[in-house]
Amino acid sequence: MVKDELLSLVDKGEMLPLMEEFYTIQGEGFHKGTAAYFVRIGGCDVGCHWCDVKESWNANLHPPTAVASIVENAAKYSNTIVVTGGEPLTWNMNPLTNGLKNKGLDIHIETSGAYPLTGEWDWICLSPKKMKLPLAEVYEKANELKMIIYNQNDFKFAEEQASKVSDSCILYLQPEWSKREKMIPEIVDYVMKNPKWKVSLQTHKYLNIP
């Protein structure tokens, strides 16, 4: 297949720059502890300085992979599929979620919300970033707001973001991993004073689960 054909299929969402796919335990947020098949899509221009998968940023490093192949692999492992990145909404997610839905699977997305919401999702985990804020449509549909706390200023940003999601959206504060020892006591204190929030931890890292 020539390069132009590949690019056309990627633009349509029929192929996606797949960085990796793996079966593991969801370590964060509302569904922590759940066995899930992760599909990590390459490509992201949000540019978080503390991102722990910077190798996902350049979509050109990850081979365009047929959505049908991703769906077949996912269906072998788990009823819960987590689409993450990178920033998966960089791409048209409709073909992927249509295929997964046809298999009767429960589909989650982890997104910064910076791009239009495509695809049909059972659970949307929104993790806004200051460099490129979410679109209104993603705020409205988010099931879970996960705010990464790197320093004290992030509490103010978290409150600003919480004011934009629906009343049913579950609110989480999660320490950035490299700052966890410093920030966990501050997050605990903040949540106790502001109980609309919950604490989220990257439990998979504590348990050494990939």
Image (cartoon, helix red, strand yellow):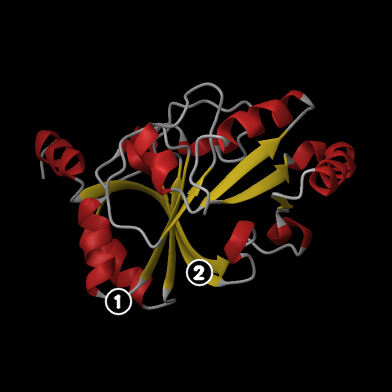
Amino acid bearing label 2: Ala
Classify the position of the C terminus by image quarter: bottom right
Quarter-of-image position of residue 52? top right
Image mark count: 2
Q: Identify whether 210 is placed above or below 151.
A: below
In the image, is 38 to the left or to the right of 161?
left
Amino acid bearing label 1: Gly
Q: Residue furthest front?
A: 167
Element class at badge 2:
strand
Check disc 2: other Cα within 10 Å, few if <14, some if 14-19, many if 20+: many
Q: Which residue is mark 1?
A: 104
Q: Nearer the viewer, residue 3 or 17?
A: 17
Question: Residue 175 location in percent, x, y?
Answer: 75, 42
Q: Which residue is mark 2?
A: 36
Question: Residue 182 location in percent, x, y?
Answer: 88, 37
The image's mark for residue 174 is: none
Residue at horizontal 40 percent and vertical 48 percent from the top: 141
Element class at badge 1:
loop
Check disc 1: other Cα within 10 Å, few if <14, some if 14-19, many if 20+: few
Residue at horizontal 34 percent and vertical 70 percent from the top: 73
Q: Earlier in the sequence, mark 2 or mark 1?
A: 2
Q: Identify whether 140 is placed above or below 108.
A: above
Q: Nearer the viewer, residue 48 or 3?
A: 48
In the image, is 189 to the left or to the right of 108?
right
Q: Nearer the viewer, residue 142 or 96?
A: 142
Residue at horizontal 48 percent and vertical 37 percent from the top: 112
Question: Residue 7 location in percent, x, y?
Answer: 17, 36
Question: Residue 146 location in percent, x, y?
Answer: 60, 45
Residue at horizontal 21 percent and vertical 46 percent from the top: 13
Classify the position of the N terminus by image quarter: top left
